[in-house]
Image (cartoon, rainbow, N blue to C red):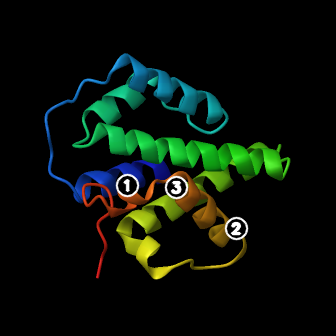
């Protein structure tokens, strides 16, 4: 559900474009993110590829997915999280924080405490400053 909300937000802030075919290297990167998120991402590879190809800025979307996957993987390993429900809740929290950053939260600093702050720190470390400034993906709500 959270993933669908994130995709809706991504599509809401950008116009609809025709499909953008992915390169073999981009497909390999999608496979890597799917491996990192195997416990929590239940979408098929074909669905994920179609979703990214249908976006107006596939490379940016892919970089955001990589940031979310990296953050998830680091936290799962760092805190030895093994409970499936906890993993799913953590991933949903990562997606919500990513949406927060996309809606301009990056400009307002860290919010919340505990997990939210840690997740935002890790996401910002994984997202390039140029991508955080790209208005095709980050659209501050004022």
* Left or right: residue 61 compared with residue 109: left
Quarter occupied by residue 105: bottom left
Residue pointed to by mark 3: 95
Helix, strand or loop at disc 1? helix
* Left or right: residue 108 compared with residue 131: right
Task: Inspect this view and state whether residue 84 appears.
Answer: yes
Residue 9, given in percent of the width and then of the height, sits at 32, 58
Residue at point 45%, 81% (across, down): 108
Label located before the other in sequence (1 or 3) = 3
Residues at marks 2 and 3 touching, judged by CB atoms closer than 8 Å: no
Residue pointed to by mark 1: 131
| Mark identifier at residue 115 | 2
* Left or right: residue 118 compared with residue 44: right
Q: Nearer the viewer, residue 138 or 40?
A: 138
Label located before the other in sequence (1 or 2) = 2
**Which residue in the rendered view is the most extreme toward the right?**
80
| Disc 1: CA contacts within 10 A as few (<14), some (14-19) or many (>=20) | some
């Amino acid at each position: 559900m959270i993933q669908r909300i994130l995709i809706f937000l991504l599509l809401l802030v950008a116009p609809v474009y025709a499909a953008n075919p992915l390169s073999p290297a981009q497909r390999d990167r999608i496979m890597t993110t799917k491996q990192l998120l195997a416990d929590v991402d239940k979408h098929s590879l074909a669905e994920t590829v179609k979703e990214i190809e249908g976006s107006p800025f596939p490379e940016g979307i892919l970089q955001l997915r990589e940031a979310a996957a990296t953050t998830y993987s680091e936290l799962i390993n760092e805190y030895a999280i093994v409970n499936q429900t906890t993993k799913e809740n953590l991933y949903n929290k990562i997606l919500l924080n990513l949406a927060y950053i996309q809606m301009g939260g990056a400009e307002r600093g860290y919010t919340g405490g505990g997990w939210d702050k840690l997740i935002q720190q890790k996401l910002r470390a994984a997202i390039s400053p140029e991508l955080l400034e790209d208005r095709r993906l980050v659209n501050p709500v004022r």
